[in-house]
Amino acid sequence: MCLAIPGKVEEITTDGLIRIGRVNFGGVIKKVCLDYVPEVEVGDYTIVHVGFALSKIDEETAEQTLADFRAMGVLDEELASEEEAFARAAQRPQSRCPDGSCSSECGGADCTTASPANTANSANPANKP
């Protein structure tokens, strides 16, 4: 999943010509490019997607959105470090077909499990149930 997450700008610096913000996402601090939102100042809330601030939002909306994301269980996943994300991905069941293109071969079933139908279909694609 890839979400835009609200965060509070705690500090603004420049890295050459680029405005960089230190943004707090409910306790997780990340560096964010602020070039797309020149109006954002320290103390403001902004929506951030893949490291870029996209728009300024009000505090109430930001806090409610963070609470909703926490309740859905997606906040930790979105704010994970690269190492944490790779570790989680390695623990998940792997699909033979991550893009879903083999789902028709599995009769719409998950191709990650070996059922008799999946085994028969993979051994002989013409053998349709």
Image (cartoon, grey):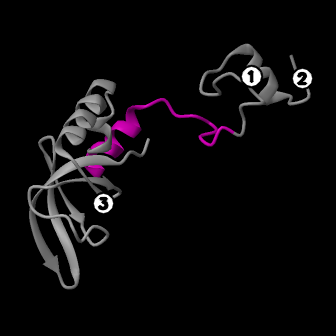
Mark 1 and mark 3: span between their CA atoms? 43 Å
Is 39 located above or below residue 5 in the figure? below
Front residue of 112/15: it is: 15
Circles 1 and 3 in contact, beta carbons < 8 Å:
no
Where is residue 12 shown, x and y percent of the image?
11, 68
Q: Residue at x 35, y 48 (%)?
A: 4
**Is residue 95 magenta-colored?**
yes
- The residue sitting at the bottom extreme is 16
Q: Considering the numbered disc 2 on the image, is that residue within a helix, a strand or a loop?
A: loop
Mark 1 crowdedness (10 Å alpha carbons): few <14, some 14-19, many ≥20: some
Q: What stretch is highlighted in magenta?
A: 80-100
Q: Is residue 32 left or right of residue 125?
A: left
Q: Which residue is drawn at 34% across and 37% down?
A: 88
Question: Mark 3 is on which residue type?
Answer: Gly
Quadrant occupied by the C terminus: top right
First in sequence, mark 2 or 3: give its number.
Answer: 3
Q: Name the residue under label 1.
A: 119
Q: Is residue 128 left or right of residue 14?
A: right
Quadrant occupied by the N terminus: top left
**Is residue 23 magenta-colored?**
no
Mark 2 and mark 3: span between their CA atoms? 48 Å
Label drawn at residue 127: 2
Where is residue 21 shown, x and y percent of the image?
16, 64
Where is residue 106 shown, x and y percent of the image?
74, 25
Q: Name the residue under label 3.
A: 51
Please tell me whether mark 1 or mark 3 is closer to you in this view. Answer: 3
Front residue of 30/67: it is: 67
Is 98 located above or below residue 70 in the figure? below
Question: Mark 2 is on which residue type?
Answer: Asn
Q: In this view, does 126 lie to the left or right of 87?
A: right
Q: Residue at x 27, y 67 (%)?
A: 37
In which quadrant of the rendered view does residue 35 lie? Answer: bottom left
